Image (cartoon, rainbow, N blue to C red):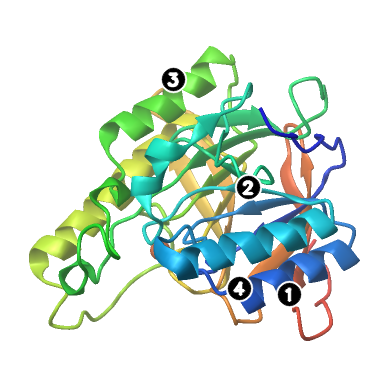
Amino acid sequence: MPTVPTSSSSTLAGFAGDWHGQTGWSRKCLTELAEHGVQTIYHVGDFGLWPGNSGKWFLDQLHKTAHTHDQTLYVTLGNHDDYDRVQFFRTDDLGWQYLKNYPRFRFAPRGHTWTHGGPDNPAGARMASLGGAGSIDKNLRTEGIDWWAAEEIIPADVTALTTNTADRSWDRVDVLITHDAPTGLARRGFPTYPAWATLDVQQYCHEQRVRLRHGVDQVMPRTLIHGHWHEFHHDTLTGVSPAGADYTTDVWSLDRDGKTRNLITGHLHLDVGLTDVVVLRPELQPEPSYR
Ligand SMILES: [Fe+2]
């Protein structure tokens, strides 16, 4: 196994929205995070795991920057990520997947669970990931080139999430990182669709959000952080678990690359979730703390 970045027990972490393989912006984000003392970054997907020379350039350059700042990125894959690369993934001792030449990038299998700061961190927040999403522009894309069927959140992914959580005897997940937004959020929607978003594609995308919601209802995250919709929101989701337990989830939706609300920092706490959230603006000054 290549050099594995050391797990940090610091509660401070960065969270980044969709980057879409934009090298300049992504490097700027890592540098901004480094200036705020952030070495652990969780990415919500549409990261930039892309085929061809542009994909290799992105990974090469970003990995160099991460190495310079001694950072590790833990990536939840989105829909615009190359799932054909998954066959080349290796798996480390904690179940994270990685590519041999990019050990500072760790990719979460669907439903992956972990403790922030490593398994020996008794105060580490209980974390989980469920990537994937339906591409609403699926009709405009070509399979294997810029669309991959494995983007789909399938019931087995939700089962993996709930099984992994149960195996750890966690009653709740502190922070769940997803690419898509589950159904039931007040500030989520797509009021009008272009002609190429045919009804079958709308249904295909919606079903995945419903599946994601089933997973959320079962693991009852205290905090949920997602991307995909290219909008920044701070929302509250209330739900009821299959066992009848009421729960409340603090939800952060991150904007895309190039936008001022693509990047946040916060502190991760066991039995609490994410606190002290600060929005970073790589070209501007940080906004006041949200709480
Ligand atoms: Fe996406």
| Residue 24 falls in image quadrant | bottom right
Q: Where does ligand 1 appear, by image quarter?
A: bottom left
Q: Position of residue 230 (x, y in %)?
A: 48, 73
Amino acid of disc 1: Lys
In the rendered structure, are the residues bearing label 2 and label 1 in contact, judged by CB atoms less than 8 Å apart?
no
For marks 2 and 3 on the same chain, the one whose residue lies earlier in the sequence:
2
Tag 3 and tag 1, C-beta contact below 8 Å = no
Q: Label 2: few (<14), some or many (≥20) within 10 Å?
A: some
Q: Earlier in the sequence, mark 4 or mark 1?
A: 4
Residue under numbered circle 3: 163
Q: Earlier in the sequence, mark 3 or mark 1?
A: 1
Residue 231, compared with residue 30, is above or below; it is below
Which residue is the site of mark 2? Answer: 102
> SS at mark 3?
helix
Query: Which dot marks residue 23?
Result: 4
Whether pointer 3 and pointer 4 mark residues with C-beta atoms closer than 8 Å, the reply is: no
Q: CA distance from mark 2 to mark 3?
A: 29 Å
Mark 3–mark 4 distance (CA, rounded to whole Å)? 36 Å
Give x and y (percent) for residue 173. 59, 32
Cβ–Cβ under 8 Å for marks 4 and 1: no
Disc 2 to disc 1, C-alpha distance: 19 Å
Image check: 137 left or right of 166? left
Q: Is mark 4 within 8 Å of ligand 1?
A: no
- Compared to 74, does 204 lie above or below? below
Q: Which residue is painted at 30% across and 65% down in the image?
A: 146
Identity of the amino acid at label 2? Tyr
